[in-house]
Image (cartoon, rainbow, N blue to C red):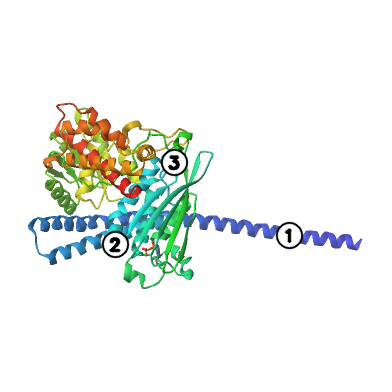
Amino acid sequence: MQSAYKRRDTLISLRRKLHRAEAKWQEAEAELKTAREAADLAGLAQTKFLAMMSHEIRTPLNGIIGMAALMLDSTEEQKQAGEDRHSLGVIMQSGEHLLQLLNDILDVTRLESGQFRLEETAFDVRTTISSAVSLMQPQVQRKGLKLSLSFTDDVPLRAGGDAGRLRQILLNLIGNAAKFTETGSVSVAVSRLGYTDGTVRLECRVSDTGIGIAPESLSRIFEEFTQADTSIARRFGGSGLGLAISRRLVAEMGGTLTAESVQGQGSVFRFDIQLRARRASDLAVTNLSGSEPASIVSTVAVKLTPKRVLVAEDNATNRLVVTRMLERLGHSVETVTNGREAVEAVQTGTYDVVLMDVMMPEMDGLQATMAIRALLSAKAHLPIIGLTANAEPSDALACRQAGMNGFATKPISSERLSQAMHAALAPMQAPEPAIDPQQPLPYAGENRLFDPAVLDQLVMRSGKAEASSAIADFIEHSTAAISRQHLGATVPDARAIAATAASFGLMRAARMGLDLTDCASADALAVFTQVLSQSVEELRSWRRLTLL
Ligand code: ADP
């Protein structure tokens, strides 16, 4: 009997303990929830704060870099003495360095606070990687290093993913390889690891023959603000953020970034990423359809005929920088200082294109664009280019959604400005479509700028040596046409080039050239010349990297 009482008491005491423990657990859970919500809010506030600061810092930087670039240009013209040019060069470099730092800090914060989102578009994998590599070519060449790129045959032509971020990772790794290598080579090798259920997994390796990394530093270099040895910042510059960002970006893309290195012999950085490939044909190298990558680097600036440009910008320095740049490019400029004035000016004046700052008092650039698009006259279709100091991907989307034809990020340069104008004024440049996960990847047919798969076939058919010399002839012929009396290609040039351009992968130039009529306007020829020179540059770097 006594033992039954004892058991009951023990049971009651245990139950009480359980209740107390449960209450404590619930209390702790509630506290954790509040703390998590507070942390999320703090993360969001931090990201918003940084995005605003970035905008505020970018605006004066635009003035510094833009003015320095203009002065460098004019000292070039006047052949002024070396010291001034040197000082201006230092201002430019420091400005650009500061800008890089700003971008890196923004990325780190977004990635850490969970506010980071990858963009997903259909892109040309091979061309995106090739153009990242060719962008680094001058830097690598300046040091006397050899740069090579190779793809295994099974690397897909097209896939869905964030082309910009893939490019960013590659630029960081190739940039490091070039920075830490004095003699020898830098090579990039891309292969396919597998394909399952609509997902393709790619591997990229960036190898160099540089100074290498000590074993004890190998794991630390992926931490923020960390460099392999403390003298590096002084010797080579850099902030120690690049690898930390790249590793996180790779993780966002479903892969890992690792490094192997032997001190004094070189390093290999390797990463894998997952991309979406919805059609079996996306994986076939022989498939020729597709659209251009998100951005193609052009080194040739072809002049547009003079345009009447309306600039809407509230910041006086930036207004001056943009106006001077446009005037130097031969355009005439009128300026207004907010969106409301821009809408009024469009209604009363005559312009070919509007450059519209996004953030302005009274009426911002997005609202002004929507107001212009709602006009009941032909002016509703006026090309509008957004100028934005915000580097967020969502800003690009907002510009497009408001009805802008394109946008350029500050600090603006003459090249970027004229490229944005060309793109907005060229009738066939459509924005890269966002991917709807339910739909197959979109195709833009022959509109692709450069298709290296055509050249792979050419090499297979005729052998490396013959293909290389045929390509060299074509490049020589086209380059002569591009610079014909400094005026660009003529209609007969365009026709002659178009007849063979597709055989060298210049799909868009081929189509545009064949479409030109005898009485094609100077603008149509300028756009053709621009497209041709961009694609010839692509072809030239492809030949250099693949055949030489
Ligand atoms: P940063 O290059 O701006 O210093 P990173 O995060 O890109 O920052 O690189 C961190 C460090 O890793 C570098 O400072 C360097 O010590 C080391 N490192 C990166 N890549 C290489 C390489 N290819 N060869 C030798 N050391 C490297």
Q: Residue at x 48, y 34 (%)?
A: 280
Write down the residue under mark 2.
Answer: 143
**Distance Cα–Cα, label 3 vs label 2:** 32 Å
Q: Nearest the camera: 232 or 252?
A: 232
507 lies left or right of 418: right
Write down the residue under mark 1.
Answer: 16
Give the secondary structure at mark 1: helix
In the orientation shown, which residue stands out farthest toward the bottom?
231
Q: Residues within 10 Å of mark 2 (few under 14, many from 20)?
A: some
Determine contact: label 2, label 1, CB under 8 Å: no
Q: Residues within 10 Å of mark 3 (few under 14, many from 20)?
A: many
Q: Where in the figure is residue 299, as x and y percent of width and height?
A: 23, 48
Q: Where in the figure is residue 472, as x and y percent of width and height?
A: 26, 43
Q: Nearer the viewer, mark 2 or mark 1?
A: 2
Q: Residue at x 21, y 39 (%)?
A: 478
Q: Nearest the camera: 446 or 188?
A: 188
Does residue 459 appear in the picture of this structure?
A: yes
Instruction: Find out if the beta carbon at label 1 lies less than 8 Å from the nearest ligand 1 atom.
Output: no
Image quarter for ligand 1 equals bottom left
Residue 156, labelled with which disc?
3
Determine contact: label 1, label 3, CB under 8 Å: no
Q: Nearest the camera: 309 or 160?
A: 160
Q: Where in the figure is residue 403, as x and y percent of width and height?
A: 29, 36
Q: In the figure, 289 relative to 182: above or below?
A: above
Going by the numbered disc 3, the residue's amino acid type is Pro
Q: Nearer the viewer, mark 1 or mark 3?
A: 3
Of mark 1 and mark 3, the one earlier in the sequence is: 1
Of mark 2 and mark 1, the one earlier in the sequence is: 1
Q: Residue at x 23, y 31 (%)?
A: 513
Q: Nearest the camera: 368 or 357?
A: 357
In the orientation shown, which residue stands out farthest toward the left?
78
